[in-house]
Amino acid sequence: MGGKVLEYEAKTIMREGIEQGIEGTVSILKTLGVSPQTILVKIQEQYHLSPEASKKYL
């Protein structure tokens, strides 16, 4: 049972890290003046997101 708890915690930590990475990427691209459409395409490519999932980061 302890293994399942550790696996869940590891997945949670990994997911949070990925989300922070995406948010950081979007922030930098916005600062550089990259268009929202280009940002969507780039984060979809980099993080293997669907168009629907990527929109929540703008």
Image: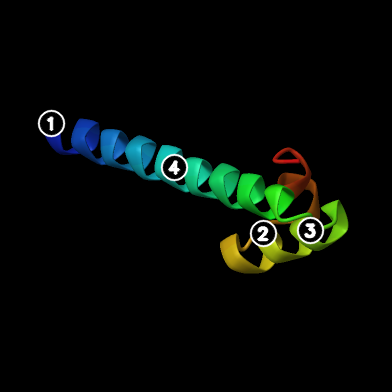
Q: Which residue lies furthest to the bottom in this view?
A: 45
Helix, strand or loop for disc 2 = helix
Q: In this view, does 37 lie above or below 56?
A: below
**Where does label 1 land, which residue?**
2
Q: Which amino acid does label 2 sit on?
A: Ile
At x 59% / y 52%, what residue is drawn? Answer: 25
Q: Answer with left or right where residue 46 lies relative to residue 18.
A: right
Mark 4 and 2 residues: CB-CB less than 8 Å, in contact? no
Helix, strand or loop for disc 3 = loop
How far apart are labels 4 and 2 at the CA level?
15 Å
Q: Which residue lies furthest to the front in this view?
A: 32
The first of marks 1 and 4 along the sequence is 1
How far apart are labels 2 and 1 at the CA level?
35 Å
Residue 32 occupies which quadrant of the picture?
A: bottom right
| Res. 34 mark | 3
x and y, in percent, of residue 38 in the image: 81, 63
